[in-house]
Image (cartoon, rainbow, N blue to C red):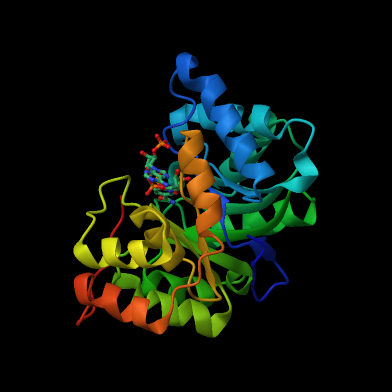
Protein backbone atom coordinates (compact mmCIF):
# COMPACT_ATOMS: atom_id res chain seq x y z
CA UNK A 1 0.00 0.00 0.00
CA UNK A 2 1.69 3.15 -1.09
CA UNK A 3 -1.11 5.72 -1.33
CA UNK A 4 -0.34 8.89 0.56
CA UNK A 5 -2.57 11.65 1.83
CA UNK A 6 -1.59 15.31 1.56
CA UNK A 7 -2.83 18.13 3.72
CA UNK A 8 -2.81 21.90 3.32
CA UNK A 9 0.40 22.53 5.25
CA UNK A 10 2.53 20.22 3.15
CA UNK A 11 2.06 17.19 5.40
CA UNK A 12 2.21 13.92 3.49
CA UNK A 13 1.33 10.76 5.34
CA UNK A 14 0.69 7.10 4.48
CA UNK A 15 -3.02 6.37 4.03
CA UNK A 16 -2.79 3.07 5.89
CA UNK A 17 -1.26 2.89 9.33
CA UNK A 18 -1.29 0.93 12.56
CA UNK A 19 -3.06 1.72 15.83
CA UNK A 20 -1.72 0.89 19.29
CA UNK A 21 -4.59 1.34 21.76
CA UNK A 22 -4.57 -1.58 24.26
CA UNK A 23 -0.92 -2.30 23.50
CA UNK A 24 1.61 -2.03 26.31
CA UNK A 25 -0.83 -3.19 28.96
CA UNK A 26 0.72 -6.58 29.64
CA UNK A 27 4.36 -7.70 29.83
CA UNK A 28 3.31 -11.11 28.54
CA UNK A 29 1.92 -9.66 25.31
CA UNK A 30 4.72 -7.17 24.70
CA UNK A 31 6.94 -9.21 22.36
CA UNK A 32 3.94 -10.15 20.22
CA UNK A 33 2.85 -6.51 19.97
CA UNK A 34 6.34 -5.33 19.01
CA UNK A 35 6.56 -8.11 16.40
CA UNK A 36 3.14 -7.17 14.98
CA UNK A 37 4.13 -3.53 14.54
CA UNK A 38 7.44 -4.50 12.95
CA UNK A 39 5.67 -6.88 10.56
CA UNK A 40 3.27 -4.06 9.70
CA UNK A 41 6.23 -1.79 8.89
CA UNK A 42 7.76 -4.53 6.74
CA UNK A 43 4.46 -4.74 4.84
CA UNK A 44 4.32 -1.01 4.23
CA UNK A 45 2.00 0.19 7.03
CA UNK A 46 4.50 2.83 8.04
CA UNK A 47 2.26 5.20 9.97
CA UNK A 48 2.06 4.34 13.68
CA UNK A 49 -0.57 5.99 15.85
CA UNK A 50 -0.13 6.10 19.60
CA UNK A 51 -0.93 8.37 22.57
CA UNK A 52 0.35 9.21 26.03
CA UNK A 53 -2.98 7.89 27.32
CA UNK A 54 -2.59 4.32 26.03
CA UNK A 55 -1.49 2.08 28.89
CA UNK A 56 -0.25 5.25 30.64
CA UNK A 57 2.66 5.57 28.25
CA UNK A 58 3.10 1.81 27.89
CA UNK A 59 1.98 1.80 24.25
CA UNK A 60 4.59 4.45 23.42
CA UNK A 61 7.24 2.18 24.98
CA UNK A 62 6.10 -0.72 22.78
CA UNK A 63 6.32 1.58 19.76
CA UNK A 64 9.85 2.62 20.80
CA UNK A 65 10.92 -1.01 20.68
CA UNK A 66 9.19 -1.59 17.34
CA UNK A 67 10.76 1.42 15.61
CA UNK A 68 14.23 1.09 17.15
CA UNK A 69 16.77 1.35 14.34
CA UNK A 70 14.14 2.27 11.75
CA UNK A 71 12.78 5.62 12.90
CA UNK A 72 13.19 7.20 9.47
CA UNK A 73 10.80 4.68 7.88
CA UNK A 74 7.99 5.70 10.20
CA UNK A 75 5.41 8.46 10.23
CA UNK A 76 4.93 8.72 13.99
CA UNK A 77 1.76 10.13 15.55
CA UNK A 78 1.11 10.69 19.24
CA UNK A 79 -1.47 12.62 21.25
CA UNK A 80 -1.55 14.87 24.26
CA UNK A 81 -4.27 14.32 26.86
CA UNK A 82 -6.66 17.27 27.12
CA UNK A 83 -5.87 17.82 30.81
CA UNK A 84 -2.19 18.22 29.92
CA UNK A 85 -2.78 20.46 26.91
CA UNK A 86 -2.08 23.85 28.51
CA UNK A 87 0.57 26.28 27.26
CA UNK A 88 3.19 24.79 29.62
CA UNK A 89 1.77 21.29 29.98
CA UNK A 90 1.81 20.54 26.25
CA UNK A 91 5.60 20.82 25.82
CA UNK A 92 6.11 18.81 29.03
CA UNK A 93 3.81 16.06 27.73
CA UNK A 94 5.53 16.12 24.34
CA UNK A 95 8.97 15.72 25.93
CA UNK A 96 7.71 12.78 28.00
CA UNK A 97 6.25 11.13 24.88
CA UNK A 98 9.50 11.66 22.97
CA UNK A 99 11.47 10.08 25.84
CA UNK A 100 9.18 7.05 25.98
CA UNK A 101 9.28 6.72 22.18
CA UNK A 102 13.06 7.00 22.10
CA UNK A 103 13.03 9.65 19.40
CA UNK A 104 13.71 13.36 19.01
CA UNK A 105 10.63 14.25 16.94
CA UNK A 106 7.02 13.39 16.23
CA UNK A 107 5.68 13.63 12.70
CA UNK A 108 2.22 14.57 13.93
CA UNK A 109 1.02 15.59 17.39
CA UNK A 110 -2.70 15.65 18.13
CA UNK A 111 -4.89 17.02 20.88
CA UNK A 112 -6.68 13.79 21.90
CA UNK A 113 -10.01 15.55 22.40
CA UNK A 114 -11.17 19.06 23.32
CA UNK A 115 -10.69 19.61 27.04
CA UNK A 116 -10.47 22.13 29.84
CA UNK A 117 -7.65 24.32 28.51
CA UNK A 118 -8.34 27.06 25.94
CA UNK A 119 -7.65 25.60 22.51
CA UNK A 120 -5.72 28.75 21.60
CA UNK A 121 -3.15 27.88 24.30
CA UNK A 122 -2.75 24.34 22.95
CA UNK A 123 -2.32 25.61 19.39
CA UNK A 124 0.24 28.14 20.55
CA UNK A 125 2.16 25.37 22.34
CA UNK A 126 1.97 23.20 19.20
CA UNK A 127 3.41 26.09 17.14
CA UNK A 128 6.34 26.49 19.58
CA UNK A 129 7.02 22.74 19.43
CA UNK A 130 6.99 22.90 15.66
CA UNK A 131 9.42 25.83 15.59
CA UNK A 132 11.75 23.83 17.83
CA UNK A 133 11.56 20.80 15.52
CA UNK A 134 10.03 18.58 18.23
CA UNK A 135 6.97 18.01 16.07
CA UNK A 136 6.66 18.35 12.30
CA UNK A 137 2.89 18.90 12.16
CA UNK A 138 -0.05 19.13 14.54
CA UNK A 139 -3.75 18.45 14.56
CA UNK A 140 -6.78 17.47 16.61
CA UNK A 141 -8.84 14.40 17.38
CA UNK A 142 -12.53 13.85 18.12
CA UNK A 143 -13.39 17.35 16.88
CA UNK A 144 -16.95 17.83 15.66
CA UNK A 145 -17.84 20.40 13.00
CA UNK A 146 -18.41 23.32 15.38
CA UNK A 147 -15.08 22.59 17.12
CA UNK A 148 -13.23 22.48 13.82
CA UNK A 149 -14.76 25.77 12.79
CA UNK A 150 -13.89 27.39 16.13
CA UNK A 151 -10.31 26.11 15.83
CA UNK A 152 -10.03 27.57 12.35
CA UNK A 153 -10.74 31.07 13.69
CA UNK A 154 -7.90 30.94 16.24
CA UNK A 155 -4.28 31.92 15.62
CA UNK A 156 -2.59 28.66 14.69
CA UNK A 157 -5.93 27.18 13.60
CA UNK A 158 -4.90 27.08 9.96
CA UNK A 159 -1.97 24.92 11.08
CA UNK A 160 -4.30 22.03 12.01
CA UNK A 161 -3.43 19.30 9.51
CA UNK A 162 -5.56 16.37 10.67
CA UNK A 163 -8.66 15.40 12.60
CA UNK A 164 -8.66 11.84 13.94
CA UNK A 165 -12.22 10.58 14.38
CA UNK A 166 -14.28 7.42 14.78
CA UNK A 167 -15.19 6.22 11.30
CA UNK A 168 -16.26 2.83 10.03
CA UNK A 169 -19.13 1.28 8.08
CA UNK A 170 -21.39 1.42 11.11
CA UNK A 171 -20.42 4.96 12.15
CA UNK A 172 -20.86 7.23 9.19
CA UNK A 173 -21.94 10.42 10.97
CA UNK A 174 -18.87 12.40 9.84
CA UNK A 175 -20.03 12.17 6.23
CA UNK A 176 -22.57 14.96 6.92
CA UNK A 177 -20.31 17.73 8.24
CA UNK A 178 -16.84 16.83 9.50
CA UNK A 179 -15.68 15.05 6.35
CA UNK A 180 -16.80 17.74 3.85
CA UNK A 181 -15.34 20.46 6.09
CA UNK A 182 -11.97 18.67 6.25
CA UNK A 183 -12.04 17.99 2.51
CA UNK A 184 -12.71 21.67 1.76
CA UNK A 185 -9.80 22.75 3.99
CA UNK A 186 -7.47 19.93 2.96
CA UNK A 187 -7.29 18.57 6.49
CA UNK A 188 -6.53 14.84 6.62
CA UNK A 189 -9.24 12.67 8.22
CA UNK A 190 -7.81 9.78 10.21
CA UNK A 191 -10.40 7.02 10.67
CA UNK A 192 -9.99 5.30 14.01
CA UNK A 193 -11.54 1.97 15.04
CA UNK A 194 -12.20 0.89 11.44
CA UNK A 195 -13.43 -2.47 12.80
CA UNK A 196 -15.38 -0.93 15.69
CA UNK A 197 -12.86 -2.76 17.89
CA UNK A 198 -13.75 -6.09 16.29
CA UNK A 199 -17.47 -5.57 16.98
CA UNK A 200 -18.40 -4.52 13.44
CA UNK A 201 -21.14 -6.95 12.44
CA UNK A 202 -20.58 -8.98 9.28
CA UNK A 203 -23.80 -8.05 7.53
CA UNK A 204 -24.62 -9.88 4.25
CA UNK A 205 -23.34 -7.10 1.97
CA UNK A 206 -19.95 -7.19 3.65
CA UNK A 207 -19.73 -10.96 3.18
CA UNK A 208 -20.92 -10.69 -0.41
CA UNK A 209 -18.39 -8.03 -1.41
CA UNK A 210 -15.67 -9.99 0.40
CA UNK A 211 -16.56 -13.16 -1.54
CA UNK A 212 -16.47 -11.21 -4.79
CA UNK A 213 -12.89 -10.12 -4.10
CA UNK A 214 -11.81 -13.37 -2.45
CA UNK A 215 -10.89 -11.59 0.79
CA UNK A 216 -12.11 -11.54 4.40
CA UNK A 217 -15.04 -9.25 5.34
CA UNK A 218 -12.85 -7.08 7.60
CA UNK A 219 -10.52 -6.43 4.69
CA UNK A 220 -13.47 -4.94 2.84
CA UNK A 221 -14.40 -2.90 5.91
CA UNK A 222 -10.86 -1.53 6.03
CA UNK A 223 -10.65 -0.81 2.30
CA UNK A 224 -13.94 1.09 2.63
CA UNK A 225 -12.38 3.49 5.17
CA UNK A 226 -9.65 4.23 2.61
CA UNK A 227 -11.87 4.87 -0.39
CA UNK A 228 -11.50 8.68 -0.49
CA UNK A 229 -8.27 10.63 -1.11
CA UNK A 230 -8.41 12.51 2.21
CA UNK A 231 -8.87 9.37 4.34
CA UNK A 232 -6.22 7.70 6.48
CA UNK A 233 -7.07 4.52 8.40
CA UNK A 234 -5.30 3.14 11.47
CA UNK A 235 -6.42 -0.43 12.30
CA UNK A 236 -4.89 -2.01 15.38
CA UNK A 237 -3.74 -5.62 15.18
CA UNK A 238 -1.47 -7.73 17.33
CA UNK A 239 -2.23 -11.02 15.57
CA UNK A 240 0.23 -11.42 12.66
CA UNK A 241 -2.47 -12.86 10.41
CA UNK A 242 -4.57 -9.74 11.03
CA UNK A 243 -1.56 -7.58 10.22
CA UNK A 244 -1.10 -9.39 6.89
CA UNK A 245 -4.78 -9.09 6.04
CA UNK A 246 -4.82 -5.39 6.87
CA UNK A 247 -1.74 -4.64 4.80
CA UNK A 248 -3.27 -6.50 1.83
CA UNK A 249 -6.56 -4.61 2.22
CA UNK A 250 -4.68 -1.41 1.45
CA UNK A 251 -4.50 -2.52 -2.17
CA UNK A 252 -8.16 -3.47 -2.46
CA UNK A 253 -10.15 -1.18 -4.77
CA UNK A 254 -13.91 -1.25 -4.23
CA UNK A 255 -16.13 -0.68 -7.27
CA UNK A 256 -19.17 1.60 -7.37
CA UNK A 257 -21.28 -1.55 -7.28
CA UNK A 258 -19.48 -2.77 -4.14
CA UNK A 259 -20.00 0.62 -2.50
CA UNK A 260 -23.70 0.65 -3.40
CA UNK A 261 -24.13 -2.83 -1.90
CA UNK A 262 -22.40 -1.74 1.30
CA UNK A 263 -24.56 1.40 1.46
CA UNK A 264 -27.59 -0.89 1.47
CA UNK A 265 -26.55 -2.67 4.67
CA UNK A 266 -24.66 0.22 6.27
CA UNK A 267 -26.66 3.28 5.18
CA UNK A 268 -25.18 6.77 5.35
CA UNK A 269 -26.88 9.03 7.92
CA UNK A 270 -29.99 10.88 6.76
CA UNK A 271 -29.64 13.72 9.25
CA UNK A 272 -26.87 15.44 11.19
CA UNK A 273 -25.71 13.51 14.25
CA UNK A 274 -23.27 14.63 16.94
CA UNK A 275 -19.79 13.19 16.52
CA UNK A 276 -19.57 9.74 18.09
CA UNK A 277 -16.49 8.63 20.01
CA UNK A 278 -15.13 5.43 21.54
P1 LIG B 1 -9.99 -1.41 15.63
O1 LIG B 1 -8.75 -1.16 14.88
O2 LIG B 1 -11.30 -1.11 15.01
O3 LIG B 1 -10.06 -2.93 16.11
C1 LIG B 1 -9.01 -3.60 16.73
C2 LIG B 1 -9.48 -5.03 16.97
O4 LIG B 1 -9.73 -5.67 15.70
C3 LIG B 1 -8.48 -5.91 17.70
O5 LIG B 1 -9.23 -6.76 18.54
C4 LIG B 1 -7.82 -6.70 16.59
O6 LIG B 1 -7.39 -7.99 17.04
C5 LIG B 1 -8.96 -6.88 15.61
N1 LIG B 1 -8.48 -6.98 14.22
C6 LIG B 1 -7.49 -6.28 13.61
N2 LIG B 1 -7.34 -6.64 12.34
C7 LIG B 1 -8.28 -7.59 12.10
C8 LIG B 1 -8.61 -8.37 10.97
N3 LIG B 1 -7.97 -8.21 9.79
N4 LIG B 1 -9.60 -9.29 11.09
C9 LIG B 1 -10.25 -9.46 12.26
N5 LIG B 1 -9.98 -8.75 13.38
C10 LIG B 1 -9.00 -7.82 13.30
O7 LIG B 1 -9.99 -0.65 17.04
P2 LIG B 1 -9.12 0.45 17.77
O8 LIG B 1 -7.89 -0.13 18.31
O9 LIG B 1 -10.03 1.14 18.71
O10 LIG B 1 -8.79 1.54 16.64
C11 LIG B 1 -7.59 1.58 15.91
C12 LIG B 1 -6.65 2.64 16.45
O11 LIG B 1 -7.21 3.93 16.37
C13 LIG B 1 -6.32 2.51 17.94
O12 LIG B 1 -5.47 1.42 18.22
C14 LIG B 1 -5.75 3.86 18.23
O13 LIG B 1 -4.41 3.98 17.77
C15 LIG B 1 -6.71 4.75 17.42
N6 LIG B 1 -7.85 5.25 18.22
C16 LIG B 1 -7.92 6.58 18.46
C17 LIG B 1 -8.95 7.10 19.24
C18 LIG B 1 -8.99 8.57 19.51
O14 LIG B 1 -9.76 8.98 20.38
N7 LIG B 1 -8.23 9.37 18.80
C19 LIG B 1 -9.94 6.25 19.75
C20 LIG B 1 -9.87 4.89 19.44
C21 LIG B 1 -8.84 4.40 18.67
P3 LIG B 1 -5.85 -8.35 17.38
O15 LIG B 1 -5.27 -7.18 18.14
O16 LIG B 1 -5.95 -9.60 18.15
O17 LIG B 1 -5.13 -8.55 16.08
Residue 171 visible to the viewer: no
Residue 216: x and y in percent read 38, 53
Q: Nearer the viewer, residue 154 or 158?
A: 158
Against 213, residue 269 (above or below) is below
**Would residue 51 appear left or right of 215 to someone viewing this image?**
right
Q: Quadrant of residue 272?
A: bottom left
Where's ligand 1: which quadrant? Answer: top left
Q: Nearer the viewer, residue 103 or 245?
A: 245
The residue positioned 51% from the left and 42% from the top of the image is 243
Percent position (x, y) of residue 145? 38, 74
- The image quarter containing residue 143 is bottom left
| Percent coordinates x, y for residue 6 in the rendering | 66, 72
Which quadrant: the N terminus?
Answer: bottom right
- Work out which residue is located at the far top of the displayed protein and give it: 28
User: Residue 92 in the image: x percent, y percent?
Assistant: 63, 37
Q: Residue at x 33, y 67 (%)?
A: 209
**Residue in the foreground of this view, choosing between 43 and 46:** 43
Q: Residue at x 52, y 31 (%)?
A: 59
Amino acid sequence: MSRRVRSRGGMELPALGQGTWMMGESRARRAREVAALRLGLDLGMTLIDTAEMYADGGAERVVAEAIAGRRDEVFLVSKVLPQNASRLGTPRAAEASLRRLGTDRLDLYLLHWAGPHPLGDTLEAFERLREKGKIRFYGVSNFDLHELEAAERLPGGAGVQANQVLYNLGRRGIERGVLPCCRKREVAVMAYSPFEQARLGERPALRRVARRHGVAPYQVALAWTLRLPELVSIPKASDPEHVRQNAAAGGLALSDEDLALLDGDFPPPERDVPLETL
